[in-house]
Amino acid sequence: MFLKLALHSLLHRRLAAMLTVASIMISTFVVLGVEHIRQETRNSFSKTVSGTDLIVGARTSQVNLLLYSIFRIGNASANISWNSYQEIAAMPGIAWSIPLSLGDSHRGFRVLGTTADYFVHFRYGNNQSLALLEGRVFNENPDGYLAILGAEAAERLGYSTGQTFTLSHGLGDVSFTQHHDHPFTVAGILAPTGTPVDQTIHVSLASLKAVHHGGPAPDSITALLIGLESRPDAFAIQRDINNYRPEALLAIMPGVALMELWQMMSIVEQVLALIAALVLLAAMLGMTTMLLSTLQQRGREIAVLRTLGASPLFLFALIQTEALLMTLAGMVLGIATLTAAIMLGNDWISSEYGLFVTARVVGGHTLPYLISGVMLTLMLACIPATLTYRSSVALRLES
Amino acid sequence: MTAAIHINKLIYSPDARRQAKQGLQDSCALLQIAEWDVAPAERVFLYGPSGSGKTSLLNLICGITTADSGEILINGTNISAQGARARDRLRMHTMGVIFQQFNLLPYLSVADNIRLGHFFSSQTHSRQTHSRQVETAIEQLTDRLKLPRSCLHQKAGSLSVGQQQRVAIARVLIKSPALIIADEPTSALDEDTRREFINTLIDCADLHNSTLLFVSHEHSLGIHFDRVVALDSINHVS
């Protein structure tokens, strides 16, 4: 009966109540959206690379090198010469190295030139290695013009093993320079990883080189992933590479570079979080205002309930319940909209930014926001509820 | 036999506290009743012009306000000496109040409005508001009050004022109160509806053996009642 009373009282004022619920819905959407995407970005970034001790590229900033080599965001400003690569790969203490060559694309998907070592040594997530869904990976060169597709690239392009296609120079869907004379054949498709690997088309370095210049040996690569025999050597080897004479190179530890990235982003994150919190506060204040403005018309209802025997505490609880109902309705709708929005926008986000955002919006990371939203509701609703309480204590029958 | 209402040496001056604060003495009382009784199951018509203190007296009897001095005994309990919570409880269990108008919550159905009367009076605040017993009682009441059963599921706000007032009676009667207080309940009704309303109210009070205190400024309504009392005749404000 109590809930029915609260519910019908709200329905009676449905326009004001609906607008309030809508504002809470929007603020929930913003607050959870910001927090969820922040969390998912971090997860997604930190699981993209695993087991790689050093990343080497032409001298640039740590973050830039990390972004273009691993996340395929942005472009390299300069390359590493083939000689430098050979020398560094041969340095003592280095267990394996994977050369990466970027710059070509096929219908919007980036093409990565690498060696067979990539499929052996590259790790993502919790030290998982790449697995094949079908077909095979290319062997040591020369093995013809073969391509291994990431799961999403294969799905979106609709390619299966045996399909042939040509690469275009540069990035972007449409390119003027097509490498028509050297069609590639899909040799294998990788299992989904939830990392940018899914959107990458892998070809051998040798074939990529052949497409461009026709020579057998490549003359430069974009970046180099390195695994060490012993991790404590990382600092020494990093210093050696940074001091490499013939060419200006930069070696970074992925974890350290990620930390720097988070630090750079933290100000933006904090500003976003602050804006989100203020939006929530504004919605809550709006609800309080709405409840306060209805108190005027409630005078009669309060008198009726009081003479029926409702205690002032009952009326206090009634207002609180109405506030709570509106907040919960707004939050549920906000969560539903956010989930729907993420599900719809997922493909775009992952192909555009290489970020994989799950639709599991409610979790340990967003729960504190939901709980504090409810607490804030109960606190702010104390204002109209207390006024109701007081006016019901001071009630007189009036004719 | 205990009187349904017994008033003894009552003094009530609503402005007293304010005036005392301002340092004024000799505040003028609004009500000063030496002694007045209403017997159980009596039908009493109390009349007086507007501003004569009728509503204040009802506020005191209901325990919504308390007297400055003197006693108001409801079935032997001095309501004026009780704490706020005890007064609420006494009112909820022994009294039913019908106002001039707006007795109902317009957004609840008629049936729910009547259930509300039961909800607050039942000791446990139990959820037994949909029990067979309550349903039967509601149907009997609507029949007796000549309300069509179809209106039970309508919103109370959609009924005519006359029908709303009859629903208000039903809501009071569902808890079979010892004392029914009606504060100008007919002032919004036309002549015919008014007579019918009063007859229904008295019949229902008879059936439940309730005391009825009916307050109005219209002297002419007095013919329907056992006893007619002018407030001026018992109120001795100097």
Image (spheres, rainbow, N blue to C red):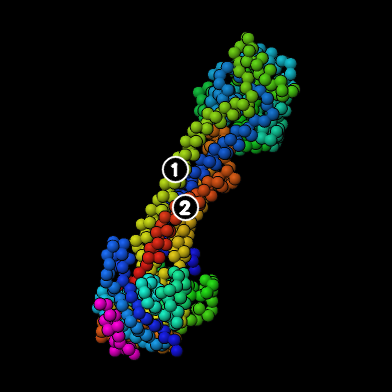
Q: Amino acid at mark 1?
A: Leu
- Is B226 magenta? The answer is yes
Residue at 53%, 28% in the rendered image: A264
Disc 1 is attached to a residue of which chain?
A
Q: Chain of mark 2?
A: A
Instruction: Measure the C-alpha gap from mark 1 to mark 2.
Output: 16 Å
Residue at the spot of label 1: A278
As drawn, A283 above or below A219: below
Q: Nearer the viewer, residue A111 or A249?
A: A249
Q: Circle 2 — which element?
A: helix
- Quadrant location of residue A134? top right
Quadrant of the image containing the C terminus of chain A: bottom left
First-in-chain label (1 vs 2):
1
Judge the density around disc 1: few (<14), some (14-19), many (≥20) Cα neighbours within 10 Å. some
Q: Is B150 inside the magenta-drawn segment?
A: no
What's the residue type where badge 2 is placed? Answer: Met
Image location (x, y in percent) of residue B221: 28, 85
Q: Nearer the viewer, mark 1 or mark 2?
A: 2
Measuring from the top left, give residue A68's x and y in whole percent.
57, 25
First to last magenta residue range: B222-238
Residue at horizontal 52%, vertical 31%? A265
Q: With respect to residue B221, does A105 lie above or below?
A: above
Taking depth in this image into account, of A80 and B229 the one nearest to the observer is B229
Task: Tell me residue A396's x, y (percent).
Answer: 35, 69
Identify which residue is drawn at 63% across, 9% down. Answer: A245
Is A226 left or right of A168, judged from the image as shown?
right
Asked whether residue B166 is in view, the answer is: no
Q: Which mark is residue A379?
A: 2
Q: Secondary structure at mark 1?
A: helix
**Residue A372, horizontal then vertical, whole percent:** 52, 48
Q: Is residue A311 above or below residue A103?
A: below
Q: Which residue is at 29% across, 73% downward? A: B29
